[in-house]
Image: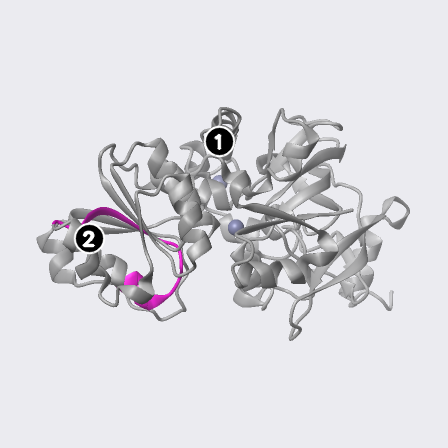
Amino acid sequence: MSDANDPAKDWLAYKGSEKNMRTEAAVAYPQREGFAHESVEIAAPNPDEILVRVLGVGLCHTDLVFATGAGGYPLPAVLGHEGAGIVEQVGAAVTKVKPGDKVVMTFRSCGACDRCASGDAAYCRTMPQLNYAGMRTDGTSPLSGEAGRLGSNFFGQSSFAGLALTYERNVVKVDVDIETLKILGPLGCGVQTGVGAMLNSMDVRPGSTVLVLGGGSVGLSGVIGAKLRECAHIIVVEPQASRRALALELGATETIDPKEAADLSAAIREKHPFGVDYAFETTGAPAVLNAAAACLGSKGVLGVVGICPPGTPPPGEMISMVTFGQSIRGIIEGDSDPDVFIPELISLFKAGRLPFDKMVRTYPLNQINQAIRDQHEGRCIKAVLLPQ
Ligand SMILES: [Zn+2]
Ligand SMILES: [Zn+2]
């Protein structure tokens, strides 16, 4: 048993090599810019696992954060957490879906804790272990690549690949054509985060004034959510002209170029003297977070999805928070209960009321680094990667 202390050997023995499959994947390596496109080996599903043939997977900022090894994420790894595709195989204990079913994959939750029981899956008590540990809960990984064992199970899916292993709590069965299915993955994270922030987390009031900081896919999904809720004023702050134009198309009533509004609160209060009822911060920039807090009116709510660097103090002034009854609300996944909310989003999309596809541009998976550059430089708002 000379191999007993070699985790890679343990893992190879564990997964049973004759059933392994090969597929393409984008792999994040430590200290390497961008992703490597390579052939990886993936294990057959465990009893509780579902093997999905990935047809499309959204590129989310969170993938790029974890690609740096943030939070101790084990690299090299396959990331990707906005996948959609067709169920290929299921483990013996899986009853929710069967081979051939079309599914959108979302974040993973346990389904057994008090949060999950009350529809608060986004705040599941085991969210970190199930989504950010980089391995199965038993410590194994079903993925290996050119460098050996790979970090896996990102958001319970690691879907920057042609095949992904996932779980019942991750998958939502959908009834759409194949071309639509390819771009549907972002409903599992970015779109449900933005729309859900408005409809669930902040539960914005019809007729209210909403400020959205950042016109990326989450901010613009927030615009769609605010429009669905019939907010009277939807103001988007975004430096890129093309994104401001799309914001107006999706339902914003005004846009602001931050380069032309050094004092954002003053600019907002020229037209809205009492400030805004809701501010939605999607950028993760401390200066923007503070500017957003300064725009709040009385009883204003600041919803935050952007992740500021560790150590960033809470925004605004305690005295104005108390005096004006304001609050700050951190938001994960739009407080979504995916089994309920994703079908609602799809109904809205089919009815033409959730045109998130206007944000989407598709790339082959092997063009992931180009997609990252385009998203970064404003040539694309939401990249969806298509395994070939
Ligand atoms: Zn739970
Ligand atoms: Zn995401």
Checking the image for residue 345, the label placed there is 1
On residue 288, which mark appears?
Answer: none
**Of residues 101 and 166, which is closer to you in this image?**
101
* Apparent side of residue 377 relative to residue 239 in the rendered image (left or right): right
Residue under the image location 44 percent in, 32 percent down: 117
Q: Secondary structure at mark 1?
A: helix
Question: Residue 263 location in percent, x, y?
Answer: 22, 65
Element at badge 2? strand
**Position of residue 362 measured from the top left corner of the image (x, y, whole percent):** 65, 47
Q: Position of residue 266 (x, y in %)?
A: 17, 61
The residues colored magenta run 274-290
Is 44 a magenta residue? no
Tell me: 311 left or right of 267.
right
Residue 180 can be seen, yes or no: yes
Q: Is 287 located above or below residue 196 in the figure?
A: below
User: Residue 170 versus residue 179: which sits nearer the camera?
Assistant: 179
Residue at x 59%, y 60% (from the top left corner): 374
Between residues 10 and 228, which one lies in front from this camera angle? 228
Give the quadrant of the N terminus.
Answer: bottom right
